[in-house]
Image (cartoon, helix red, strand yellow):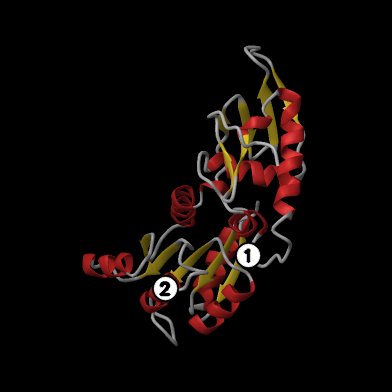
Amino acid sequence: MTVKLLVVEDEPAIQELIAMNLKQAGYSVLCANDVTTAIKLCNEVLPDLILLDWMLPDMSGVDFAKKLRREARTKDIPIIMLTARTQESDKITGLDAGADDYITKPFSPRELIARIKAVMRRRLPEMSDEIIEIGGLKLDPVMHRVHAQIGNDPQSIELFLGPTEFRLLHFLMIYKERVHTRAHLLDRVWGDHVFIEDRTVDVHIRRIRKILEAAGKENLVQTVRGAGYRFSVEKNDEVAD
């Protein structure tokens, strides 16, 4: 899944340099010169992370960060403040406003990308490239492969999932044992601007279970009646829909 970044920076040369390096690193990049444009872009396509300059023409980055944290739709978006302010008090102000990290200018592209990856690992682990192994299932998000062990056999078989089923299984495995409503899964796996029926989730859950059945792993994806779905290695009597 391509990570969408929003760069809010009013200096054209700095904005262009940041955007170029992020695109080369494989990110999808949106750019805004001011808060007004940034809000418009957030309303159109919710970014996965925002790189936010402190000094902006229509509102300070600190005030915009506070605004983002107050809004239900944007309160969980990771924010990295970019600023020339180096005082400890300024850093504390930025972090208190809701920023997840604070980078002082000038900074190298390598440092910026490393900071982005660190914040994404903490705040949005489903965007991570790390391999996950739970309950005899091994999911590799980079190679887009899922392998399953059958019983005590050290050998594994490969399971073939479609793109949506892969993203959904990945998300459930990342947040194992947590119960997710259909609406939450639609927002986090499909995206909050995709308007489809909640029951679409049920269809994809059934497909995942059918695929996992080949390895006897279908019970890992569980139904919690009246609540939603979870990935769990604990026994559950409510698997079938």
Which residue lies at the image location 41% right of the left edge and 84% below the top edge?
Answer: 59
In this view, the residue in front, 111 or 50, is 50
Crowd around label 1: few <14 · some 14–19 · many ≥20 (10 Å) = some
Q: Amino acid at mark 2?
A: Arg
Name the mark on residue 233: none
Whichever of labels 1 and 2 marks the residue nearer the N terminus, that label is: 2
Q: Find residue 23 and report its horizontal and vertical position in percent.
A: 62, 59
Q: Amino acid at mark 1?
A: Asp
In this view, the residue in front, 198 or 89, is 198
Going by the image, does 86 lie left or right of 16? left
Quarter residue 213 falls in = top right
Name the mark on residue 70: 2
Task: Check disc 1 and report the residue beneath it.
Answer: 192
Instruction: Check the picture and name the quadrant holding the C terminus.
Output: top right
Disc 1 to disc 2, C-alpha distance: 18 Å
Q: Secondary structure at mark 1?
A: loop
Residue positioned most to the bottom: 58
Q: Find residue 49 and report its horizontal and vertical position in percent.
A: 51, 62
Which residue lies at the image location 63% right of the left edge and 70% below the top edge?
Answer: 45
Q: Find residue 36 and report its horizontal and vertical position in percent.
A: 52, 84
In this view, the residue in front, 140 or 135, is 135
Residue 133 lies, with reference to residue 120, above or below; the image says above
